[in-house]
Image (tube, helix red, strand yellow):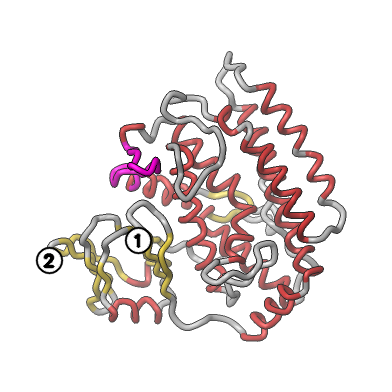
Amino acid sequence: MKQLLNTLFVTTQGSYLSKKGDTVLVNVEQETRLRVPIHTLGGIVCFGNIGFSPFLMGLCGENQVHLSFLTENGRFLARVQGPVNGNVLLRKEQYRRSDNLQESAEIARGIVLAKIANCRVVLQRALRDRPEGQSDGQTAISSAINNLSYPLEDLRRPSDLDNIRGIEGIAANTYFSTFDHLITSNKEDFYFKDRNRRPPLDNVNAMLSFVYTLLVHDISAALEAVGLDPAVGFLHRDRPGRQSLALDMMEEFRPYLADRFVLSLINRKQVRSSGFQKTESGAITMDEDTRKALLVAWQNRKQEELMHPFLQEKVKIGLLPHVQAMLMARYLRGDLSGYPPFLWR
């Protein structure tokens, strides 16, 4: 099994990253604050005004360390990558399947089915784990669990992409309609009315958007590592600058990896309302300390293990994107009869 490598998150404004031999140096005000061997890294994510040596970019490219540049508030700006991995025949097959709307719909159907099933499990776990005596929202959550069984049944039959997207949209509305009931503490400062982004208008949506960005980085890096093109998807169609396949595969991970993670930070009071500010435009942003706390918790979460439902072996949560990318590549090569999406049990 592939080794889980670290991701270096750089949030201190004005930092400059350079290389010395095979080591990454993080300098702040001409003082070296951190030294990290390149072989221990799988990616570097820079937030805001971060400088980067072109020679370090070359070293990262040679070692398949993926670079992502985001605004200080976590909005994606650009990615830098080295030589393309994998067999060109695999990517050509990926392109052929993407151009075939019927085959794209079949792959998308499995991904959306897994997403809805995982959303349902999140609600079931939340209902089971509610604090004793807290009955608020139980009826709404139980109703949503029941209602999500209908789109799952619909997806058991072949369908076209437009219908699959329609089913996914209805299921997402059902799921997020009860999301506020999953927040069991700090209700005055952490509440959820609806999913909003670009910009996020409340603390919960700010955290969700931030974690989704981290997840897309990890999935894109995993796809590139197995030789797939993150930009050519099946559910999400081609659009310049969009990581369509990474967004496809993120759908099955959102409930388990992102949504549940954000809920746990809030419910365990690991984040505070003082770490969020509202800008003149109404957008909600996180301060540096809150972002750092979230990133540390995210890295710790990736070290945890679970039994993979398809492989039937324990893997670290941080390797789930790599495992699913590997399974997608095996399916496209013809080694598997279908793509087995991640189903949380």
- The answer to if 289 sits in the magenta stretch is yes
Q: Which residue is mark 1?
A: 8
Residue 12: % across, % down: 24, 55
Label 2 neighbourhood size at 10 Å, few (<14), some (14-19), many (20+)? few
Residue 336 inside the magenta-drawn segment = no
Along the line of sight, which residue is nearer the eye, 244 or 114? 244
- The residue singled out by tag 2 in the image is 30
Residue at screen point 51% across, 82% down: 84
Which kind of residue does numbered mark 1 sit on?
Answer: Leu
Disc number lying in front (1 or 2)? 2
Name the amino acid, label 2: Gln
Residue 31 lies left or right of residue 286; in this view the side is: left
Q: Position of residue 130 (x, y in %)?
A: 58, 24
Q: CA distance from mark 1 to mark 2?
A: 19 Å
Residue 277, relative to residue 58: is it above or below? above
Rendered-image quadrant of the C terminus = top right
Q: Is residue 345 visible?
A: no
Looking at this view, name the residue that lies furthest to the bottom.
88
Return the residue found at the far right: 157
Which residue: 55% across, 40% down?
260
